Image: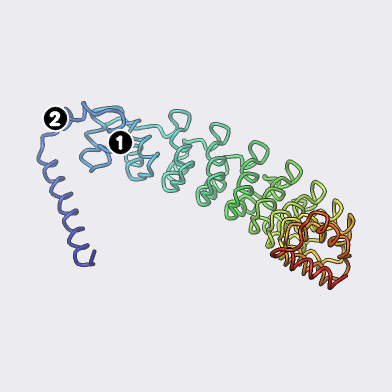
Amino acid sequence: MSKRSSSRSDDAVGGGKRAARCIVDMLPRDMLVCVADFLGARDRGPFARTCRLLRGIARRAFDPMPSFAWACMHGYTDLAEELMYGDETHERVHPAADDDFALCVSSKKGYVGVVRLLLRDGRANPAARQNYAIVESSARGHTVVVRALITDGRCDPAVKQNYPLRQSSETGNASVVSQLLVLAGGRVDPTAFDSEAIRTSSTLGHAGVVKLLLAEGRADPAAADNEPIGDSSANGHADVVRTLLTDRRVDPAADSNRALRKASEYGHADVVRLLLGDARVDPTNDGNYAVRQAAIWGHVDVVRALLADGRCDPTGALAAMDRWHCTGFGEREEIAQLLREAA
């Protein structure tokens, strides 16, 4: 659609809305009240949202609480505010009604305008329903909502054994993790559950989260026998491996060089090169397991990297390939030739 036709279309829509409102303004209020009486609970929010006149009719015709809940559920800050503070001649809603449903649902859906309105009012309780607001907003990555809730100061960012930090680390929401670590300060504990935050973020490849946790300093990157570097290597997350290797607490040779063994077995050549760059890593461990598995599974680039390192023995890998009938075709024949030349 051209800009000209688009603008005409917009003008037509705008004109239609203005015409509809003019017609509504001409109708007697008692008639509108009668119309409102026939509305179901689901239709009352959209009815009140249409224009200021219908908002007044809605407050006169039926309980405004369903309209308020609808406004918060769909992010209509203006309607929510009017229902909270509008005309004194009509019933006003209490923002903490229904066990703070309004704040809970707006936080869960990320409607920061509604959240700020409710927090500024002061009657809503951000710690309601076991700190539901910050639990859900953290899990869903609503960074600005998380910031507003923490700044308010009444919620507990360490609720459910630091669930907000653990969950945002697992899902890779680095901006939420940053807010929790910086604004919540000592109230959150990244060492909870044996430093679960850095273990899960490393395993799942969230390098940004790993960097934040390492910079903060309390999370232990060597937790669970160096699980972070072991799992990130096995899963091929080179950025995470590179980040972890900058921390002196990390031992890439832990658990019998598990990081190198698994990276070689699964064909992650870039990770293998990073690990070989650390003098603590031993590619000959477990009878040259790394080169044997890389050869059997046909990972040419991994075999090249291991042979270039110069420490592993290619004869065992060549024998294993013969035993498993892996030579004579495709990439495996290329690997066999590399091993023969290095033997």
Describe the element under mark 2 as helix, strand or loop: helix
Above or below, comparing residue 328 to residue 15 in the picture: below
Which labelled disc corresponds to residue 45?
1
Nearer-the-camera pick, 24 or 56 = 24
- Determine whether, in the image, residue 275 is placed left or right of residue 96: right
Above or below, comparing residue 58 to residue 299 in the picture: above
Amino acid type at image mark 2: Asp
| Residue matched to label 2 | 30
Q: Position of residue 43 (x, y in %)?
A: 28, 33
Describe the element under mark 1 as helix, strand or loop: helix
Amino acid type at image mark 1: Gly
Q: How far separated are the C-alphas under marks 2 and 1?
A: 19 Å
Which labelled disc corresponds to residue 10?
none
Q: Position of residue 220 (x, y in %)?
A: 77, 51
Residue placed at 23% from the left, 67% from the top? 3
Res. 151 visible in picture: yes
Q: Which color scheme does this rendered protein use?
A: rainbow
Q: Position of residue 133 (x, y in %)?
A: 52, 39
- Residue 310's image quarter? bottom right
Q: Position of residue 21 (x, y in %)?
A: 16, 45
Mark 2, mark 1: which one is toward the viewer?
A: 1
Quadrant that contains the C terminus: bottom right
Nearer-the-camera pick, 234 or 97 = 234
Label located before the other in sequence (2 or 1):
2
Residue placed at 82% from the left, 69% from the top? 307
Q: Characterize the local packing of mark 2: few (<14), some (14-19) or many (20 or more) Cα atoms within 10 angstroms.
A: few
Q: Are marks 2 and 1 in contact (CB under 8 Å)?
A: no
Quadrant that contains the N terminus: bottom left
